[in-house]
Image (cartoon, rainbow, N blue to C red):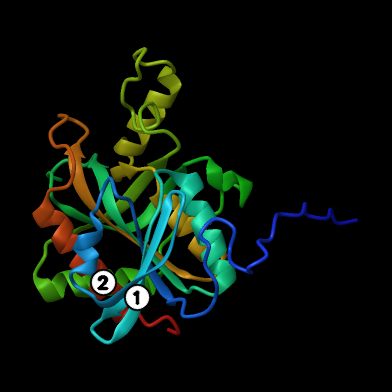
Amino acid sequence: MALEPLKATVPQDGKSWWLRLGRERLPEKFIFTLLLDMEPRCFLEQMTDVEILSQFGEYTVYAGDFRGERLGVLFHGSGSFSVSTAIDELAALGARAILRVGNSGGMAPGLRVGDLVVCSGGIREDRVMLDYVPLEYPAIPSRQMVAAEIAACEALGVPYREGLTLSVGTMYPGSGFETARGVLDEAVLRRVHLWKKVGAVNVDIETTTVLTMTRLFGMHGGALLGIGNDTATGQGEFLETATTDRMALLGLMTLRGLHVDA
């Protein structure tokens, strides 16, 4: 006999629990990002008729017009938990596309701070996604989303690199960095070096959540990532303004060029 799911709280106003959104006037396509990575003005200055759809807890959701299409921009908290909760609620409300635009650490030789990566697949070390599907389930972007990202980059003449993104569960040990007590588990560090050896070009803590869940829920998903720091040298801090402005425009152009019915 199938197990009955437990009952979650349903707010009396009919809006989603965490995002506080309803179906009315909900855009079909969303950019996901963090305040740590991108300022809202990067997107909002390039849009018209902007409105705040919701602002609750760690989430702020905007909608506005970009070149004749209404798009959404969702700011979330750091890590897989925050992203997974937002995607689950948006999928239930009928959203059809999510593009992560944000920061990552460079792992591949030749990648420099400020470079852009069009994610062609993800390595699932985030752990949170194991509550949804086993590890064998792939973290792969929508082919249409990748094509739209490349088209946007080429239209603006912006160089990019395609590659695999390693997404981890923790900022410090998961990324191969020292903790406040140094390296606690060398097995974790060895896995980071293994993924780097076999082709991971960058590392973050959100991308595989986007790729896994959008594919699982029949949505278009993808990631356009800037290189904020070089994990081999420690060079770089946060993404520079010129980089985030360019990435915001590329992200909006990507969603504008994406055909969700393809």
Q: Which of the marked residues, 2 or 1, is nearer the chain's N terminus?
A: 1
From this view, report whether residue 198 is shown above or below residue 136. above
Judge from the rendering whether residue 81 lies leftward or rightward of residue 122; answer left or right: right
Is residue 136 or residue 118 the one in the foreground? 118
Judge from the rendering whether residue 232 lies leftward or rightward of residue 131; answer left or right: left
User: Label 2: which residue?
Assistant: 252
Judge from the rendering whether residue 231 lies leftward or rightward of residue 210; answer left or right: left
Question: Do the CB atoms of the residues marked 2 and 1 lie less than 8 Å apart?
Answer: yes
Q: Is residue 135 visible?
A: no
Residue 60 point in image, percent of width and height: 39, 58
Judge from the rendering whether residue 240 lies leftward or rightward of residue 20; answer left or right: left
Q: Is residue 182 visible?
A: yes
Is residue 241 or residue 154 the one in the foreground? 241
User: Label 1: which residue?
Assistant: 71
Is residue 15 or residue 36 the one in the foreground? 15
Mark 2 Cα within 10 Å, few/some/many (few <14, many 20+)? Answer: many
Q: Quadrant of residue 47?
A: bottom left
Mark 1 Cα within 10 Å, few/some/many (few <14, many 20+)? Answer: many
Is residue 37 or residue 229 the one in the foreground? 37
Residue 11 point in image, percent of width and height: 65, 61
C-alpha span from label 2 to label 1: 8 Å
- Callout 2, which amino acid? Leu
Residue 50 point in image, percent of width and height: 29, 74
Residue lying at 50% horizontally and 57% vertically, measured from the top left? 86
- Callout 1, which amino acid? Leu
From this view, report whether residue 128 is shown above or below residue 192. below
> For the C terminus, which image quadrant?
bottom left
> For the N terminus, which image quadrant?
bottom right
Q: Quadrant of residue 140?
A: bottom left
